[in-house]
Image: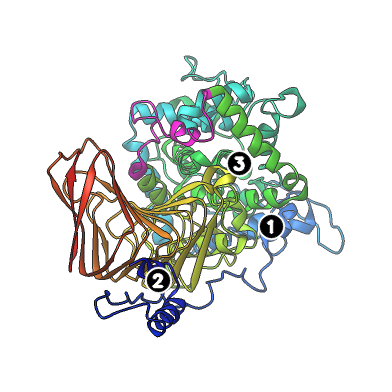
Amino acid sequence: MQDLNLLRRLPLALAVSAALALAACGGSDNNAPQLLAIPAAPADAGAADTAPAPANVPAFVDNAATNQRGDARYATAATNAGVRVLIGMLDIWRPLTEIVDAGQTAPAVAGFPAVTASVWTGVPNDGTAGGTIVNAAVHNANIDYVVKATAARTKEQELAAYLDDRRAKGYSLSDGMGPLTEAWRSAARQTTSITGIAADATTVLYNDSGNNTGVAGSANPEFGNVVALVNAMGNNGSTEPAKRFYKYARPYRWSSSVVVVPALNPAKSSTPATDGGYTSGHAAEAVRGALGMAYAVPERYQEIITRGLELGENRILAGMHSPLDVISGRVQAQAVVAANLLDPATAATKGAAVSQARATLMLKTGTTADTFYDYAHSGTPANDRFSDYATIKAAYIRRLTYGFAPVGPTTAPAVVPKGAEVLLETRLPYLSEAQRRVVLKTTALPSGYPILDDAEGWGRLNLFAAADGYGVFTGNVVVSMDAAKGGFNANDRWRNDISGSGKLTKQGSGTLKLDGNNSWTGGTVLEGGRLEGTSANAFGKGDVYVSGGTLACNAPAALALAAGYTQLATGALELKLGSGQQGRLSVGGTMTVAGGSLTVSFQNGYKPAAGDTLNVISAASLKGKFDTITVAGFKVEAVYTDNGLQLKLSV
């Protein structure tokens, strides 16, 4: 028997050779059990997927500095990156002139002709629209959306729209930090003077006497690097070149049925020709700030970027902007932030900002590296309106397109802009740059939506979904996590529904939880650390092979493996049982156990009694045994059958 235990710990080829050697020297006999045949690991699925930047397309991150007005060199879509990234608008609306010239002049320079101010009035109903509506269905839906939204606006929405209009955007955004909000504002020394709708609504100005993002630099030694990082996200981020190029009027100028928040009427510009709506400056600034904050505190990544898009929607509810204005603000802002994070001046200091944010917020909240994430998500809907994952996910997805129907083919392959992977650098730190690009590719929006099919791919990015990991496995996907680095390197959770024909290999010491309704077919190999299934179909439809580390079952129902399960003597299985079938393992194919350990624990108040028999594993066929079985609080007798494992409990 000792010889057979040794065989279980050997790779298949070595085990076969050792078995033959034992037989040759009399080490086996006719009464010994048959050698356990260990299946091979899931087959190689080929090269991992890639997401190369589109060829022959000027990269925004290389040309962000061209996003200027008042310079003849950057007066066209061909020469201005901030205009070019929003070029899809020309399929809906053609401005009077395709030049950055609304209320704008610029002298000739370096062979570029001088810019003469456009005659566009900014008022579409003055006898000429000042341009051409190319797609009336989309344009009409765009304005009609604002008409309906402002007509149905509640008092609560009116106040939120007013505050997000007048108050500095940085202060507004920081409530997306939830339980960390007060600590963030205190550390940043962030203030505002706008706390409600002014009693005198005839003198509204953008006069928040607070300090927007807070105090940056050496004047704020505990958080100055963080504030400086967020501030840097605005570099080359002006929306004025796009406004003065596209010359698309604000919604209340297109339709008198748009109801602007009454207290904001005095804030309307008196110079419509220089007050275009496309793109929204507030929406763009909100997304820039949100992405800077999310980079610094990735534990609140999805919540804070949702707050950024919420601020954009409040511009619609205010009557000040249309959905296309707001969507374009998001698109441009994503590109601007990527460019700034990659800028050498920022790249050299962003790591220090992230470290400072984490250290200071932990100090102010009395948390540790092990408790910080849980504290950041300890809010409830009563005190953190971003606490419900399903709710904020639905809101984020809705705001990506605002219900517009596709106007083009929906199956074009996604492309990923050069440098876009930096937007996930702190959220998925254990993935390589190439892997983060594939995550962006496999979670992108379908093609075809108005203004979102820019050549680089900025419009189709879905950062909320990307923060939940891969959407598709193609080829060999190898994930290695180092728990010693802390944060998401130590523990992360992927919530997307992962499809594809690829294979997942988990390495390293960290923990990865899979929570989607997954269907990938290439199988799963666990070599190190912990891989936890928190949904019934967490491991897709392929074989699961545990050669090292711990595979944990923590699904609300039985964790169902569609194919086979193999565990070597160097592997471990953990079942976290609750009531019903929670935490049990159901194997659709053959379960081969060549030793290793099984650990059973209990959760959610479930506690069996001595004398109970637990049905913990079912399989089409069960072969082999665990070396050790441990059940929390009980002694255990294992009862193996051809189709499963029962545990009889005693004390």
Q: Closer to us: mark 2 or mark 1?
A: 2
Magenta extent: 365-391
Taking depth in this image into account, of 292 and 247 the one nearest to the observer is: 292
Q: Decide: is 493 above or below 157.
A: below
Q: Which mark is residue 7?
A: 2
Q: In this view, does 631 lie to the left or right of 333?
A: left
Quarter of the C terminus within the rendering:
top left
Does dot 2 land on a helix, a strand or a loop?
A: helix
Instruction: Determine contact: label 3, label 1, CB under 8 Å.
Output: no
Measure how far apart labels 3 and 1 are at the Cα level: 16 Å
Disc 2 crowd, CA 10 A, few/some/many (<14, 14-19, 20+): many
Q: Decide: is 228 above or below 240.
A: above
Measure how far apart labels 2 and 1 are at the Cα level: 56 Å
Taking depth in this image into account, of 354 and 522 the one nearest to the observer is: 522
Q: Which mark is residue 29?
A: none
Amino acid type shown at disc 3: Gly
Horizontal and vertical percent for residue 129? 52, 54
Taking depth in this image into account, of 620 and 60 the one nearest to the observer is: 620
Q: Name the residue under label 1.
A: 61
Which residue is depicted at the point 63% across and 48% down?
337
Q: In this view, does 603 lie to the left or right of 532?
A: left
Q: Which of marks 2 and 1 is nearer the N terminus?
A: 2
Q: In this view, does 11 lie to the left or right of 562?
A: right
Does dot 1 land on a helix, a strand or a loop?
A: helix
Horizontal and vertical percent for residue 502? 44, 72
* Residue 383 part of the magenta segment: yes
Amino acid type shown at disc 1: Val
Measure how far apart labels 2 and 3 are at the Cα level: 54 Å
Q: Earlier in the sequence, mark 2 or mark 3?
A: 2
